Amino acid sequence: MEQIKKAGIMDAGAVRRAVNRLSYEMVEKNHGAGAIVLVGIYTRGALLAERIAQKIGEIEGTRPPVFALDITAFRDDKPNAPQEVVLPIPEHEIEGKTVILVDDVLYTGRTVRAAMEGVLRIGRARRIQLAVLIDRGHRELPIRPDYIGKNLPTSAEEIVRVHLTEKDGCDEVVILQKNDTQEQ
């Protein structure tokens, strides 16, 4: 199925401003950065978590720890996922801390549910918060982000793509339209 670019939503400047705003909101809501741990959902959530940690370090003078979490084994749509999972986060980094899950796009909520399960298997966080660059709606689970870069109402036929320089060579958010037409 071909995908056609429908609209550019955020350019590099807008992405940078959103990351800055998210960082300031996290510091304010948590009364500093001392008890924050950022867990980025692999791949682009992990990249965003690194950017946020860098900005928080500039704001607070101390950079929170950042970990990347691959949620594949915790997905409810992968019944054959391995049961034994090696989690890359030491338990002492989670216990009693505020864990902020970071992802690029929040859609159905299933990725976030899987990430929460991964964090809970590691240890008992004081609380878990959620930060997303884009919230596009269409939830299948009762999940609501604490920090949102941009609300973006979309249809189910649209695809939201976040491109980040570290992975894609540029910073932007675009909407793609599924093209179901086939050549006759």
Image (cartoon, rainbow, N blue to C red):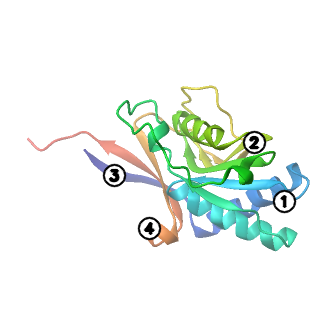
Report the residue marked by disc 2: 125
Report the residue marked by disc 3: 4
Name, please, the residue furthest toward the right: 31
Image quarter for residue 178?
top left
> Could you give the CA–CA distance between mark 3 and mark 4, rounded to whole angstroms?
17 Å
Report the residue marked by disc 4: 168
Name the residue: 74% across, 52% down. 92
Name the residue: 79% across, 54% down. 36
Instruction: From the image, state whether disc 3 or disc 2 is nearer to you.
Output: 2
Give the mark, 4 or 1, whose residue is nearer the N terminus.
1
Amino acid on which the number 2 mark rests in the picture: Ala
Q: Quadrant of the N terminus?
A: top left
Name the residue: 86% across, 50% down. 30
Give the mark, 1 or 3, whose residue is nearer the N terminus.
3
In this rendered view, identify the residue nearer to me: 139 or 101.
101
Circles 1 and 2, Cβ within 8 Å, touching? The answer is: no
Q: Residues within 10 Å of mark 1 (few under 14, many from 20)?
A: many
